[in-house]
Image (tube, rainbow, N blue to C red):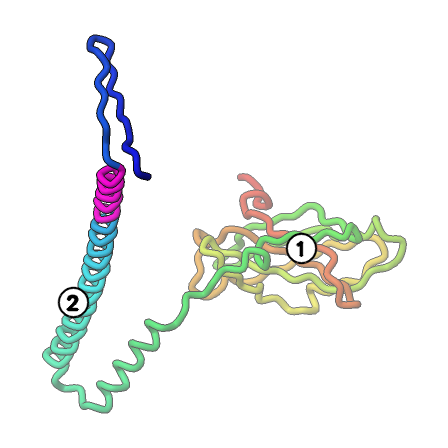
Amino acid sequence: MGGKYRVLLMRDDDHVRRFRVNPLWFWLILATILTLAMVAAGGAYGAYTLWDKNQKMAQERAGMEKQLKDAEGALESCRNEKKFSPSINPVDQKLLIESINKKKQEPKASIDLVKIMGQVDLEQVAIRNLNFKQVEGSGLRFTFDLDNEKSKKALSGAAEIYLITTDGQSFGADVEKEKLRFNIQRYKTIDITFPLPEGIGMEKLFGLRLVIGLSSGSQVFAKTFQLSEITPKE
């Protein structure tokens, strides 16, 4: 370490220049460069930390402003209720508010697509000649042929009829259960008439769901037919 470092500077258009540097100055320059690099890195990290903190504070402020606006809206609603309902006594007013809040909290009924559109066919019965139409008044008539040609023994059980609306609701047909029971060796025609569900018009009907179950409790057939498929064309 007692000697000096020799530094050569060379250019294509100039002669070579030689310098002799004391090792102490060389290490001082290197240490200075490293120190400046570390200071720059620390400054960048500090700037990022401050920016991130400001972002979080801005988000918290936005959340608090939203809560404040919601609270002001609720307060204004309460003031309006008191302004326009002076004749309601405190007890009735409390019951009314509780009823409104309960309705707001009631979840919307979900639609079970499997229940209204799922298909089952164990190939024990055959369904043919389905016919659906509106009869005089608000009545509906549905006929179909049921046979067990795919089975070697007599079958007994009952059919279930459901009306499916365009918004996914299901209404069981108002039919005497006896008319839907069967005990067949080969073949039977089921012919039933039933009213439209209360408050439901023909324009709200989408399809008819037919379910066939055996006396043993097993379901051997289930399918939803679109009304346009089983309604005779005029």
In the shown orientation, is residue 51 left or right of residue 107? left
Residue at the extreme front of the image, as rendered:
2
In the shown orientation, is residue 36 left or right of residue 159? left
Q: Residue at x 67, y 57 (%)?
A: 191
- Please state which of residues 66 and 51 is positioned toward the viewer in this rendering: 51
Q: Residues within 10 Å of mark 1 (few under 14, many from 20)?
A: many
Q: Residue at x 77, y 63 (%)?
A: 214
Q: Quadrant of the N terminus?
A: top left
On the image, the x and y values in percent for residue 84 come to 12, 78
In the shown orientation, is residue 117 left or right of residue 38? right
Three-letter amino acid code at the position of disc 1: Ala
On the image, the x and y values in percent for residue 72 come to 14, 71
Which label belongs to residue 69? 2
Three-letter amino acid code at the position of disc 2: Lys
Q: Quadrant of residue 75?
A: bottom left
Q: Residues within 10 Å of mark 2 (few under 14, many from 20)?
A: few
The kind of secondary structure element at disc 1 is: strand
Which label belongs to residue 63? none
- Please state which of residues 109 and 7 is positioned toward the viewer in this rendering: 7
Q: Residue at x 23, y 32 (%)?
A: 21
On the image, the x and y values in percent for residue 187 come to 80, 53
- The stretch of residues the image draws in magenta is 23-40
The kind of secondary structure element at disc 2 is: helix
Residue 33 on the magenta span = yes
Q: Disc 1 designates what residue?
A: 222
